[in-house]
Amino acid sequence: MQKAFKVTLIPNQNQQVLINKTIGSARFVYNCFLALRMELYSTEQKTLNYNACSQHLTLLKKEIKWLKEIDKFALQNSLRNLETAYKNFFSDLKKTKGKKGVGFPKFKKKHGCKQSYKTNFTNNNIQLIENRLKLPKLGWVKFHKSQEITGNLVNVTVTRTSSGRYIASILCETEIEKHPQVTHNIGLDLGIKTYLVTSNAEVVDNPKYYRTQTRKLRKAHKKLSRSIKGSSNRAKAKVKLARSYERVTNLRDDFLHKLSTCLIKENSIICIEDLRVANMVKNHKLALSISDASWSSFITMLEYKALWHDRIVQKVGTFYPSSQTCNFCKSINSLVKDLKVREWSCPTCGNENLRDMNAALNILGEGLRLIAKSSCINTAGVSPAAKRLFKTAAVGIPEALNACRELVSPGAIQAEIVEAGITPLLVV
């Protein structure tokens, strides 16, 4: 399995110059061949694929001498990125009008977009010893070692951030040590005031890192706007502002990684809502808080960590009324659509419900029901009796009957899954 390790590089002055040259050359090649393909299509109605562009690049190196100073893999990967951009554009044209999200490839800018290049491992051109990384053309570069990097090297992506730091993402083919199997299942209800509430009545507060840093960010913005364009003080203010934003991002990522790792370690099945964040941020009153919560990143972390450790992440439909449904009698109360209603009494059974806790319990029940319905358990090599268990057990309610008509709970069903040695698949 492939895993990326991020480290902060400590290049010397000459290495910084060469990294900047490589990033600029990769951008130049991308823009040059994008313009060539556009011109060729407008004049002759033809296009160039990656192989044709690669042949042209060889001729271009003979004309432009400084391209020979650059790592060849960085330029080749730039052409691959262009080819991928074209493929994404044409595949997006086949989608319906409302779901299109990828436009025609655009020219890369020197400022305002990601500045990076990628080099591939071949013939030991990339090596790793303790806190030093050997890269083509650059030689040995020191880095801050915060974790053990294990596995066989595949490629390295070097990025220059807006704050002037150099980050290397080292992709390795490695064996991930899996967490021990557990039998506990959980439902999560994501929110703004509290980041999430679990079906176990655990509440995780929302740290709101952007809002807590608003005063510092406003001060940095004010200092940048008042500085003279082209001055050294403006350049310093720009870097300081970038570092402030970088700190917010790092704090949020640290929180999300720790929370997602804890949930994956302690639970076998995690049920969560399928949130459409792009539509939710259209509400301008909540857009900032939703963006600050970064729900999409959190769900992505849960998904790939579940894949690593043989867990299941089950998404519940967007329009499932988790907050309006009473978890006791399953009746729907439409009055709960109002977000101000945090506690409500079920008009049918009289059960007192806390909004977030009730939603988490309903999400867990619906997620377990969807898992049983879709038969998403990998039953290869399992006895027919065990297969019938997963197809017939109604795990969406507190208690259910298995294939042998025995009364079991969802936790007992999960225990039988583990005991049977069945590998769960990632459900998205």
Image (cartoon, grey):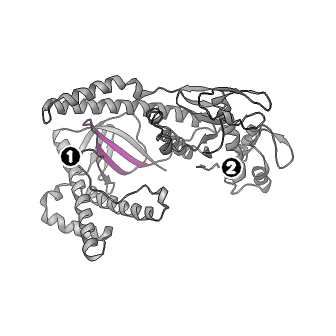
Residue 152 among those drawn in magenta: yes
Front residue of this view, candidates 22 and 148: 22
Residue 191 among those drawn in magenta: no
Residue pictured at 32% horizontal, 27% vertical? 217
The quarter of the displayed image where residue 365 is located: top right
Real-space Cα separation, disc 2 to disc 1, in angstroms: 50 Å
Give residue 20's mark.
1
Front residue of this view, candidates 324 and 151: 324
Please, what is the three-letter code of the amino acid marked with disc 1?
A: Asn
Front residue of this view, candidates 385 and 324: 324
Nearer the camera: disc 2 or disc 1: 1
The region drawn magenta spans 149-173
Instruction: Say what secondary structure mark 1 lies in.
Output: helix
Which residue corresponds to mark 2? Answer: 422
Count of labels in the image: 2
Q: Which of marks 2 and 1 is nearer the N terminus?
A: 1
Please, what is the three-letter code of the amino acid marked with disc 2?
A: Ile
| Residue 386 screen position, x and y as percent | 77, 51
Circle 1 residues within 10 Å: few <14, some 14–19, many ≥20: some
| Residue 228 screen position, x and y as percent | 14, 31
Instruction: Say what secondary structure mark 2 lies in.
Output: loop
Q: Specify whether residue 188 is in view.
A: yes
Left or right of residue 255, residue 191 in this image? right
Left or right of residue 63, residue 376 in this image? right
